[in-house]
Image: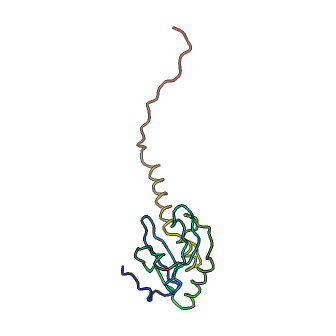
Amino acid sequence: MAQPAVQDIPEGSHLVTRRRTYRHHGIYVGGGRVVHYAGLQRGLQRGPVEEVTIDQFANGRPIELLGCPCSSVESRAVVERARSRLGENDWRLLTNNCEHFCWWCVRGEARSYQVEALYACLFVHRAASRLLPSRRCRPPLRNTCQSSASP
C-alpha cells in the first residue's frame, strides 16, 4: 500500500502503522498532527492520549489510511472527540488501547479488533486442548499405601 502524502490525508482519518506484534492506531487532526493513545510506546510506563507529529506517530514506519470521514461535519466531530480525551491516562491493553480510542472517535464505539482476534484464538486453543488427548507425561500410578501387618 502506498504511503499517503500528509497533504492528502483528510482531517479525522483513522491511521494505522504496523509495529512488531500489533498495529498502532491514531486520528489525523490536521497540520501534520495525530492524536493517539501512547500506551506502552515508551516502555513499561503507560502513556496518555497525546497529540504528536505524524512522524512521531509513525516512528519510522509506513502509515496506512484505515478510513476517513465522509463529510467535513463528520471530520470535525471525529477531531473534536479525539481532542476531548487529550491527557487521559487510563490505557489498558485489553479494554482501552489505541484501537479502542480510535474506533470510539470514529464510530462512538470503543472496540479493538486485535483484542477480539486474540480472544478468539485463545478460545479456539482452549476448546481444542479439551478435545485433544493430553500429551503431558504422567508418572505411573504407584501404590503408596504400606501394609501395617507384620510378616
Using the image as rendered, state which of residue 36 and residue 70 is in the foreground.
36
The number of numbered badges drawn on the structure is: 0
Colour scheme in use: rainbow
In the depicted structure, whether residue 53 falls above or below residue 23: below
Is residue 56 depicted above or below 132 in this figure?
Answer: below
Left or right: residue 4 compared with residue 151: left
Picture coordinates of residue 85, whole percent (x, y): 62, 76
**Relative depth, front residue between 34 and 71:** 34
State the residue in front, 144 or 43: 43
The residue at the far top in this view is: 151
Whether residue 72 is situated above or below residue 95 in the rendered picture = below
Residue 92 picture quarter: bottom right
Q: Kindly identify the residue that appears in the image at 55 percent across and 11 percent down.
A: 149
Q: Nearer the viewer, residue 73 or 128?
A: 73
Query: Which quadrant does the N terminus fall into?
Result: bottom left
Quarter-of-image position of residue 2: bottom left
Residue positioned most to the left: 1
x%, y% of residue 119? 50, 61
Q: Residue at x 63, y 79 (%)?
A: 84
| Residue 144, image x, y percentages | 51, 23
Is residue 44 left or right of 61 when viewed as pictured? right
Horizontal and vertical percent for residue 97?
Answer: 55, 68
In the displayed structure image, the side of residue 45 where residue 65 appears, left or right: left
